[in-house]
Amino acid sequence: KYRRQAPIIFNRYEKHRFVSGYESILNCPATCNTKNFIYVSTCLCGDAEYISETKYTLSSRLEGHRSISNHLIRRSLIGER
């Protein structure tokens, strides 16, 4: 079962503090159909972040991350290639 957490809803021009302590102003909302953006994913432990950019939609990029993660899990647990 997936762990459910409430999404973080940013208002326009809200500051976000990264794990490193760096602060950035978030200047636009995003939806599943948003393209060409920079994004950050923070680990549930709060100690690590992954920052990247994409020209694809948010939903497409997240599906890519999910697919790669599932492949790595299958490969490491059952040796599937």
Image (cartoon, rainbow, N blue to C red):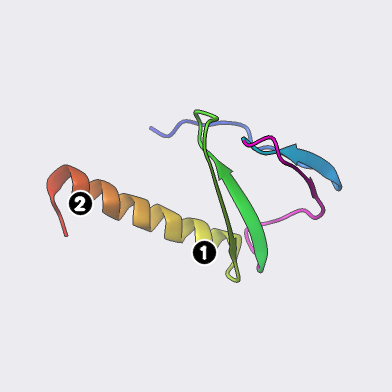
The residues bearing labels 1 and 2 have C-alpha atoms spaced at a distance of 23 Å
The quarter of the image holding the N terminus is top left
Q: Quadrant of residue 58?
A: bottom right
Front-lying residue, 64 or 33: 64
Q: Relative to 36, does residue 18 appear above or below in the rendering?
A: above
Marked residue nearer the N-terminal end (1 or 2): 1
Mark 1 — residue?
60
Residue shown at the point (71%, 55%) measured from the top left: 30
Residue shown at the point (68%, 37%) measured from the top left: 8
The quarter of the image holding the C terminus is bottom left
Can the viewer see residue 23 in this picture? yes
Q: Relative to 50, does residue 16 appear above or below in the rendering?
A: above
CB contact under 8 Å: marks 1 and 2 = no
Indicate the secondary structure of the residue bearing disc 2: helix
Front-lying residue, 2 or 13: 13
Q: Which residues are magenta?
A: 20-35
Q: Quadrant of residue 14?
A: top right
Residue shown at the point (66%, 68%) measured from the top left: 36
Q: Which mark is residue 75?
A: 2
| Amino acid, disc 1 | Ser
Residue 63: give x, y in percent of width and height. Answer: 46, 58
Q: Relative to 61, does residue 74 appear above or below in the rendering?
A: above
Magenta highlight on residue 32? yes
Count of picture labels: 2
Front-lying residue, 44 or 8: 44
Residue 77: give x, y in percent of width and height. Answer: 18, 42
Q: Residue furthest right?
A: 13
Q: Is residue 73 left or right of residue 19?
A: left
Q: Which mark is residue 23?
A: none
Can the viewer see residue 34 in this picture? no
Residue 9: give x, y in percent of width and height. Answer: 73, 40
Q: Are there few (<14), some (14-19), or many (20+) residues within 10 Å of tag 1?
A: some
